[in-house]
Image: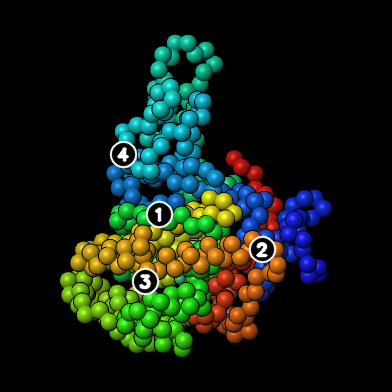
Amino acid sequence: MASTIPRSIHAQSSEGSVDYSLLVQEGRVHGSLYTSEAVFHEEMDKIFQGGWTFVAHESEVPNPGDYVTRRVGTQSIIVLRDKDGDYLAFYNRCPHRGATICSSRSGRQARLTCPYHGWTFALDGRLIGVPYPAAYPQTFERATLGLRSVARCQSYGGFIFVSLGAEDRSLDDHLGNAKSLIDDLLALSPLGRIRLTGGWMKHRIRSNWKILFENQIDGYHVHVVHGSLLASNKTFTSGRDRTFASPTRVRDFGDGHVDIDHGSDYRAIDKPLLWMGRHSTHSYQEYVGAMTASYGESEARRRLVNGPPHSMLFPNLSLAEMNIIFIEPVGPGESIAYTTPVLLEGAEELNQRTLRRCEGALGPAGFLIADDAEIAELTQRGLNNMQPEWIELTRGIDQEEVREDGSRIAGLMDETGQRGFWRHYRNVMAAPRVARP
Ligand SMILES: [Fe+2]
């Protein structure tokens, strides 16, 4: 195997395609995967458009006619709730001359009207109005000129996912064992539901989307990148000691999904609500009462000890404890991270506090995301240098516990999650292109 791959050709084979099985190896990956335009475009095609990606949450479109617009890979997609309460996703393009139908990020409409020539569409996408129709020929077929739906749009636990490709994998297959992570989050609501209605904060970060994914499940950087935070806050000072000898486990669920199981730490201490602040004096009596009324004392206590997941679901959704983050790739060296608090249905007292904590950690001057964004940008800038060519990812590789279901478990600071991400990435990227419908 060649140890040196000229950056200029990104290990392209003689056919001109990128050889992902050479660039992604167990324990090391090639730096060009973070910087190459060709790789980025292939990722948008195969990962973000060809497979399942998170696009919106049901609570963002609660009523018929409510919509949001989102990027999926390079595509602008309208996600809306129709008259029957179903979720539909359309390409944001008028079938007439191609204009963008919805230019707002969100809204509510009884019907969708193209801003160019006024063609009008029902909420199910049918073309229902054409100004001055008399000039159209007899061959003009309204039935074929509706908004174009994406291939698949389905939800799990309120999270709506789309797939623009023709792959036959179900959402159930894609989420696999990681469905339990969504279940664990919903389990914290007395009503079993969450809503993402606190508003999305938007951070434009000059780094590749994969750097953000890898950082989100990285337990090794915390004491360095967030060192000033740890040093300045007594809530986190004990956290630092904990990090060095932490019982917290990282779990690679397969299919690129990864979780940092802080619950393993909380269960060892066996105290409810540590996830809302280790030294918090807040008792959340109303919330604990509502959980107990819903689930009974011992089950409520189990859920309150266990807390929320800290996960990345491939390729773009992070269940980041009491925050949701999703990543929108813009280019090989640019991404947008959207963040919002997890609001639990039936827990309004707790929600107020969650909202403030989310602003503090992930807001415009947030003490976590600012540090993470800076190191992501420094990493991207470093990777633009051509040498050394490889990223080293062997930490903990000999100490992983492999379970029967194929998942791998290791220590908080091991790079098991990153290796799990890359293993799935290589499978998806090395596969042949899927035809688009
Ligand atoms: Fe961080």
Name the colour scheme: rainbow
For disc 1, the neighbor class at 10 Å (few under 14, some 14 to 19, many from 20) is some
Mark 3 lies on a secondary structure that is: loop
Mark 2 lies on a secondary structure that is: loop
The label nearer to you, 2 versus 1, is 2
Q: In the rendered image of this protein, does residue 126 appear above or below residue 55?
A: above
Quadrant (top left/top right/bottom left/bottom right) for the N terminus: bottom right
Residue corresponding to mark 2: 385
In terms of sequence position, does the residue under pointer 4 or pointer 3 come before the other?
Answer: 4
Residue corresponding to mark 1: 202
Mark 4 residue type: Arg
Mark 1 residue type: Lys
**Residue 213 seen anywhere in this rendered image of the structure:** no
In terms of sequence position, does the residue under pointer 1 or pointer 3 come before the other?
Answer: 1
Residue corresponding to mark 3: 308
Where's residue 381, x and y in %?
59, 62
| In-front residue for pair 111/5 | 5
Kindly report the distance in space between the C-alpha atoms of the residues bearing marks 4 and 3.
32 Å
Q: Which mark is residue 314?
A: none
Residue positioned 73% across, 59% down in the render: 7
Q: Are marks 4 and 2 in contact (CB under 8 Å)?
A: no
Residue corresponding to mark 4: 108
Kindly report the distance in space between the C-alpha atoms of the residues bearing marks 4 and 1.
22 Å
The label nearer to you, 4 versus 1, is 1
